[in-house]
Image (cartoon, grey):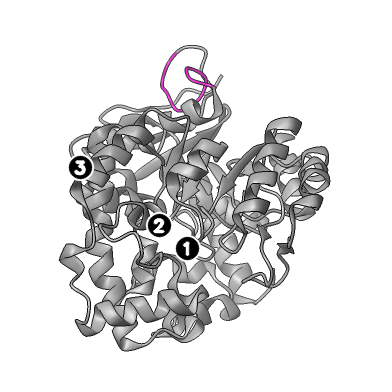
Amino acid sequence: MVVIDGKGKFLAPGLMDMHTHVSKPEQLVVNMAYGVTTIRVMWGNPETLELRAAVQAKRIPGPRIIAAGMLIDGEPPYWPGSLAMTGPAAADALVAEQRRDGYDFVKVYSRLTPEVFSAIAVAGKKHGIEVSGHVPQAIHLRQAMDAGLKTSEHFISVLWSVFADPNLPNPDVSPMFPETAEFLRSIGSGAIDVTTLVDPEKVAVLAAYAADQDHWFVPTHQIMRNFTDKPLPPFEDGVRFLTQEERLILKDGAISEFFGLTADQKKGESMLYTVRSEVLRAFYEAGAKIMVGTDQQTMVGLATVGEMKALRDVGMSNADVLRAATMELANYLGRSGELGELREGAVADLILIGGNPLQDLNALGHIFGVMTEGIWYDRLELDRMLEEVATKSAGGTH
């Protein structure tokens, strides 16, 4: 029996990141070492399923993995390698295949037509697999929720659904749609008054409706700053875990350069970020269900507490932020009482920390040990594992 001295410390449930991207065991180690004991991989493949199986069998250390299948988009897909669907006929077979292959849910994306999205949602119900992801650009949030979308990522479609003028374009994922990019440039240049965009009554009605649905929001609020003129700075502690190729993503201006964002567009995104924060707070106050997700591909693990702080800054209490990073996972999975709690009979996913996060979320950055499904890793072991990751990354190997 292992006896752990926790005197003067605080025990908390392991954290979750409900929107991330991992592709190698080293990223699992980094997540775990920073207190993340469950992750939700938003674009999976057979290698993801192999990682999930290896963690489940305790062949490699890491957090519990919930995995999407291949991303399903319209034509042309925005990201190379996505599954493109031009019509609804293929939806049933595709969803059945992802269910049969063992993925936990189907991820839909922004360029799907309403007809194809509806067919995927129907197929998901038929085959007993969750459908989650982006609310497609041409669909309002309520339509997506009514169709059965389980989670919506990045708070997409919410602003469009509460615009005072319903004829305005959807302002989300602006680099993907020319009309949206132009709209953001008009906001940034001052041609459109951002303070008049949202109808407060529509916000109240939609927020109250969303709170009653079997639907969770994963805002990834922190990383959405990368579209603005105040992008998210890199986490200095995490650079050592990246290969030289991965570090290129962090160089100044890399995100703007990749997406082709203009100065006015970034300014418009900054102005909308403030509006989005206000609407997100209204949804929280109405009781909408929110989970923590980072959308990280490089700074996995390190960004989780940062996202929690971003939600706190929106107006969530520390207690509710902690629930959004722990207990809401159990509610979302239908496993309340089994995950995300410190109680007898629950899965032993735990972190031992140096302060009370109810008072200060910075306490989550002082980890003395992590337990994943009853396996204990003390600080010395975690540091040893991280050093191995850093050494391997410096050599450029994957």
Residue 100: quarter of image: top right
218 on left or right of 84: left
Q: Residues within 10 Å of mark 2 (few under 14, many from 20)?
A: many
SS assignment at label 3: loop
Q: Which residues are magenta?
A: 335-343
Q: CA distance from mark 1 to mark 3?
A: 22 Å
Task: Please tell me the numbered disc located at residue 299.
Answer: 1
Residue at image coords 47%, 38%: 370
Q: Please state which amino acid type lies under the numbered disc 1.
A: Met
Asked whether disc 2 touches disc 1, contact meaning CB atoms under 8 Å apart, the reply is yes
Judging by the rendered image, the residue that carries numbered circle 3 is 360
Q: Where is residue 179 shown, x and y percent of the image?
A: 44, 77
User: Residue 106 in magenta?
Assistant: no
58 on left or right of 135: right
Judging by the rendered image, the residue that carries numbered circle 2 is 303
Q: Where is residue 317 shown, x and y percent of the image?
A: 21, 38
Q: Is 157 drawn above or below residue 254 in the view shown? A: above
Q: Please state which amino acid type lies under the numbered disc 2.
A: Ala
Residue 73: quarter of image: bottom right
